[in-house]
Amino acid sequence: MTTSEKFINSKSNLQCMSNAERDTQRKYIKIDYVKCTGCRTCEMICAITHGSTAPSHSRIKVDSFFPGIDIPSLCKHCIDPPCFKCSFGAMTMENGVVRIDKEKCVGCGVCAQNCPIDAIKIIKSKAIKCDLCGKCVEMCPTNALFFSETSEEAKLTRTDKDEVMKEILGVGGL
């Protein structure tokens, strides 16, 4: 089994793989919006995985538009990331994965201001964002989150959320 297959198919390997192994191929976390129930398990497990019990410290965010209309969002690891406008060089890309160098990050917020989907937060004077650890995918009770190697569904902008909501309600489509 290749490293890529292990990464996508084996829940136990998600927590054991090194960043170097994980970076061998570009990956995306995709979202099946219809399957999402808004339970926020992804937010809680993300916060816990990264050392907090506060859901506000999660690297994935679930926006509730109406009862039953919940749309998760997280870093899409853009090919040409607008967050790279960081004056301190804290934003890097390794094999298609956008990373934050915690040593260089001063929490100025330029990366967060330039992110078109609000996927970067400043917590305790440091920027945080999805690092593709995979815990949210592993723990999602409805399998609404999953890994993919294609970017088509990974392109979500603020304006696209309205289209997703219309699709879920059955009044329009993407």
Image: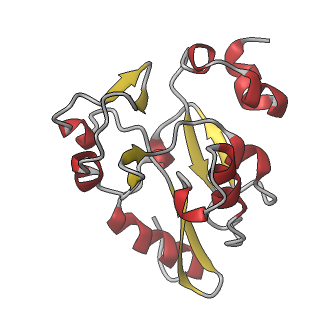
- Nearer to us in this view, 65 or 120: 120
Quarter of the image where one finds residue 162: bottom left
Q: Residue at x 30, y 52 (%)?
A: 112
Q: Which quadrant: the N terminus?
A: top right
Q: Which quadrant: the C terminus?
A: bottom left
Q: Residue furthest front?
A: 124
Left/right placement of residue 18 relative to residue 111 reads right
Quarter of the image where one finds residue 116: bottom left
- The mark tally for this picture is 0
94 over 121 or under it: above or below: above
- Nearer to us in this view, 57 or 22: 57
174 over 138 or under it: above or below: below
Q: Residue at x 72, y 30 (%)?
A: 8
117 over 129 or under it: above or below: below
Counting from the top left corner in percent of width and height, residue 107 is at: 30, 46
Quarter of the image where one finds residue 42: bottom right
Counting from the top left corner in percent of width and height, residue 74 is at: 49, 52
Counting from the top left corner in percent of width and height, residue 55 is at: 60, 63
The colour scheme of the drawn protein is secondary structure
Q: Residue at x 29, y 31 (%)?
A: 90
Counting from the top left corner in percent of width and height, residue 3 is at: 70, 14
Q: Residue at x 40, y 32 (%)?
A: 102
